[in-house]
Image (cartoon, rainbow, N blue to C red):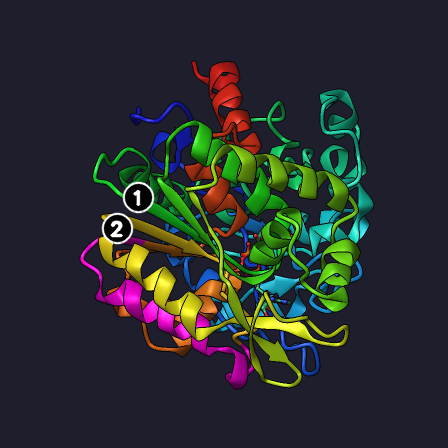
């Protein structure tokens, strides 16, 4: 038996067994060619998949969110993974039903199948996750649970999502943490439980909802001493503190967050309670004009605050220089476009030069780290973005909770 409160792959023998493996290969996708722009997450599953080479392995995963450009089929991911692993992977363009049943019934030891994007099915994300009866009665769980001996969950990047393909099998049979989950948890615990201070978080990117929610836990539990905000997260805090960030940036927040008023309230409360811990940029590079402005200037209606400006870079560097533990999730700006990549590059450069423990995570953040050549300087590159910040915040994590419950049910 292992030392974790959940099953790991050491606890079972998968020889000739039918194994469900949920991974997280949600990757940045080129919106025009649909090509996978960064294969870090795909690369992180070689240990788990190699260890399961004697099983009949069925892989599930998600890509993107409904309505977004990157909400694509997993056909390309299956080809990519097949090439990386040097193993044939049969792609089935459904998640359950007769084509899946038939393909699984014909599997031999060593075969691998990948099923279609779990989020093509509304039952994956749009049900009441507080009621497990509903989850158990989804077509996804009813159909798939007939097929498997074991359920391995290795989707560390999605552990904060209580979605059907991630937690729905907790009563169907042994639910097991994969090798990536084990590695992530043991590495991230080094940051979480380190007493070396100051500890700083750098939160950027566009998914502001996760960033605001975890900030409260980070401060309340004293997990970090400062949070440096960039990207849309910074815009939200600036808006909450009464700054004029311009129409286009306000619209961006509104259009991408149904609960944006609630988020602004939460951000305002945090600013009132922890003013000295919240570190915000005060100048920016505008898109499209490429002007460097401070927030004392008016932000024209048609301009995006696309990168942090030179003063803010210097201010952030001072905090990074003093830190003993650092993690970053989310770029400082629209790093994909050269003209707006300087903030992200400079901040990653300063982190790379620091002797602190350095953790980086998030699909686009990793892509930026790889693109600018900083990967080798990081102590740990997590596959998690939202998952990483939620895990470090010490809040309860739905997939880990389900794994723990499952071990209690199937432990003997
Ligand atoms: N100020 C900004 N306005 C609009 N978009 C921005 C801004 N700053 C950054 N972005 C965009 O945010 C995206 C990355 O954010 P995201 O939150 O997805 O980061 P991530 O590292 O992938 O984390 P996760 O894995 O949680 O998704 C990039 O496409 C970038 O262009
Ligand atoms: O990329 C991620 O953070 C995970 O795959 C979860 O994706 P989501 O934020 O769209 O739920």
Which residue sits at x=69%, y=67%?
Answer: 70
Q: Which residues are magenta?
A: 336-358
User: From the image, which quarter does the N terminus lie in?
Assistant: top left
Question: In the figure, 194 relative to 287: above or below?
Answer: above
Q: Please state the horizontal and vertical placement of residue 328, each as a whole percent of the image.
A: 41, 55
Residue where numbered disc 2 is placed: 323
Nearest the eye: 270 or 204: 270
How crowded pointer 1 is (Cα within 10 Å; few <14, some 14-19, many 20+) is rated as many
Nearest the eye: 378 or 261: 261
Quarter occupied by residue 266: top right
Which residue sits at x=24%, y=40%?
Answer: 197
Which residue sits at x=45%, y=28%?
Answer: 220
In this picture, residue 411 sits left or right of residue 351:
right
User: From the image, which quarter does the C terminus lie in?
Assistant: top left
Question: In the figure, 97 relative to 33: above or below?
Answer: above
**Lower position in the chain sequence, tag 1 or tag 2:** 1
Return the mark for residue 199: 1
The stretch drawn in magenta includes residue 339: yes
Residue 29 visible? The answer is yes
How crowded pointer 2 is (Cα within 10 Å; few <14, some 14-19, many 20+) is rated as many
In this picture, residue 3 sits left or right of residue 69:
left
């Amino acid at each position: 038996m292992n030392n974790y409160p959940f099953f790991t792959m050491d606890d079972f023998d998968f020889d000739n067994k039918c194994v469900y493996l949920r991974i997280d290969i949600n990757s940045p996708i080129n919106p025009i060619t649909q090509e996978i722009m960064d294969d870090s997450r795909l690369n992180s599953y070689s240990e788990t998949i190699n260890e399961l080479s004697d099983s009949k392995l069925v892989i599930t995963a998600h890509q993107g969110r409904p309505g977004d450009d990157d909400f694509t089929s997993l056909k390309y991911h299956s080809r990519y993974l097949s090439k990386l692993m040097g193993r044939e992977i049969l792609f089935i363009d459904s998640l359950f039903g007769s084509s899946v049943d038939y393909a699984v019934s014909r599997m031999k030891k060593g075969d691998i199948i990948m099923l279609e994007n779990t989020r093509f099915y509304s039952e994956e994300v749009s049900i009441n996750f507080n009621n497990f009866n509903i989850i158990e009665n989804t077509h996804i769980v009813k159909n798939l649970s007939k097929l498997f001996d074991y359920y391995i969950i290795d989707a560390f990047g999605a552990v904060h999502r209580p979605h059907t393909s991630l937690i729905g099998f907790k009563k169907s049979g042994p639910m097991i943490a994969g090798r990536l989950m084990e590695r992530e948890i043991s590495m991230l615990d080094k940051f979480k439980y380190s007493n070396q201070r100051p500890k700083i978080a750098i939160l950027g990117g566009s998914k502001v909802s996760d960033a605001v929610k975890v900030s409260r836990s980070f401060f309340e539990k004293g997990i970090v001493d400062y949070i440096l905000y960039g990207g849309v997260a910074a815009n939200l805090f600036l808006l909450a503190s009464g700054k004029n960030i311009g129409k286009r940036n306000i619209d961006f927040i509104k259009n991408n967050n149904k609960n944006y008023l609630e988020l602004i309230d939460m951000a305002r409360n945090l600013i009132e309670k922890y003013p000295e811990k919240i570190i915000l940029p005060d100048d920016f590079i505008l898109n499209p004009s490429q002007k460097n402005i401070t927030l004392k200037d008016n932000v024209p209606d048609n301009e995006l605050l696309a990168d942090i400006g030179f003063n803010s870079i210097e201010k952030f560097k001072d905090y990074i220089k003093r830190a003993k533990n650092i993690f970053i999730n989310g770029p400082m700006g629209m790093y994909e476009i050269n003209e707006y990549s300087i903030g992200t590059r400079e901040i990653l450069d300063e982190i790379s030069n620091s002797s602190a423990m350095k953790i980086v995570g998030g699909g686009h953040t990793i892509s930026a780290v790889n693109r600018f050549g900083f990967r080798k300087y990081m102590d740990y590159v997590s596959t998690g973005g939202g998952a990483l910040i939620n895990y470090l915040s010490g809040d309860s994590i739905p997939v880990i909770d389900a794994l723990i419950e499952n071990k209690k049910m199937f432990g003997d």
